[in-house]
Image (cartoon, helix red, strand yellow):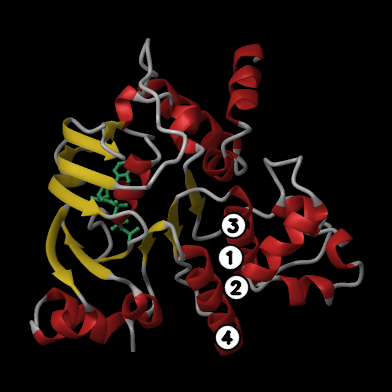
Amino acid sequence: AVMVAGSVAALSEIWGELQRAAGATERLVELLQVEDAVKDPATPAALPGTVRGEILFDDVTFHYPSRPGVAALDQVTLSVKPGETVALVGPSGAGKSTIIQMLLRFYDPEQGRVLLDGQDLRELARGDFRRSVALVPQDPVIFAASARDNIRFGWPDATDAAVEAAARAAAAHDFITALPEGYDSPLGERGVMLSGGQKQRIAIARAILRDAPVLLLDEATSALDAESERLVQQAVETVAKGRTTIVIAHRLATVKQADRIVVMDEGRIVAQGRHEDLVAQEGLYARLARLQFT
Ligand code: ATP
């Protein structure tokens, strides 16, 4: 029990992991096992003071240990320039979430390398590079705490002004100030229940506050009302500016706005380009676009 508590304390700085850990105990145990699967190097390489956010998947192949027969990623090579926004699309099981999981180094590739600013993730201390990577999950965890503390979660030193600036940038300020106690309003189980779009904007505000050069965003699949959709879109645009952004995209507005769309299928990248070009190719993307985005 002491060991588990220690591990949890060590993890508590790392937002993405908490998102995963905050659910059921089973999921926490699962997470800790995953943590054991990847090890920090004895002498980690140093990231430069300023991370540019260049990402390279270099011929990466990976199978989940529990599913050795299926390549979750099959010889994937993907290069993302600093500041670029890439939208990942593809049918269920294509490998989109696995890309995100590998970037958070929940798993290591069996073959190939994942590089951040030219450094193999395996050569870096995890705490070090995860500070450079912010995750906005599909269904963000909202804690039983005030709106303010929910946004500054993991960054207790963030000032009220910084929290509010992040909320404004994430298009969350207006709905928060409309709550009975504004930023002090309790959220979560016994507090105000938020809509899916509001939760995502809280998570985007958290990511803005962290100011990480790399942003990983798993877009909500659930339907949002038109206004919420517009506000989330606006928040995504703001947070993506000046950061390397990889978004698992479920909305037409997101893919249209991306610098590049990467189409995945069965663990492989099968096409890349802009929306119009991919639609014109009449391949998997055109079919997906007709099904998903209309
Ligand atoms: P979705 O849109 O449904 O989330 P995806 O494109 O994100 O799909 P992945 O979740 O990356 O796809 O899955 C890639 C492959 O790996 C699939 O065959 C999937 O069944 C498998 N897989 C994903 N997660 C796990 C896991 N934790 N354990 C075992 N197999 C997994």
Which amino acid lies under the numbered mark 1 shown in the image of this protein? Gln
Nearest the viewer among 273 and 24 is 273
**Comes first in the chain, label 1 or label 4:** 1
Q: Which residue is mark 1?
A: 200
Q: Position of residue 164 (x, y in %)?
A: 76, 62
Above or below: residue 174 compared with residue 245 = below
Which mark, residue 197? 2
Residue 43 placed where, x, y %?
Answer: 37, 12
Q: Earlier in the sequence, mark 2 or mark 3?
A: 2
Check disc 1 and report its element: helix, strand or loop: helix
Residue plotted at (73% across, 50% down): 143
Mark 4 in CB contact with mark 2 (< 8 angstroms): yes
Q: Nearer the viewer, mark 1 or mark 4?
A: 1
**Occupied quadrant, residue 63:** top left
Q: Is mark 4 within 8 Å of ligand 1?
A: no
Q: Is mark 2 within 8 Å of ligand 1?
A: no
Residue 208's disc number: 3
Viewer-nearest of discs 3 and 4: 3
113 to 36, vertically: above or below: below
Considering depth in this image, is 116 or 102 the residue closer to the camera? Answer: 116
Q: Are marks 3 and 4 in contact (CB under 8 Å)?
A: no
Q: Are marks 2 and 3 in contact (CB under 8 Å)?
A: no
Spatial CA distance of label 4 from label 2 is 8 Å
Q: Is residue 54 above or below residue 171?
A: above
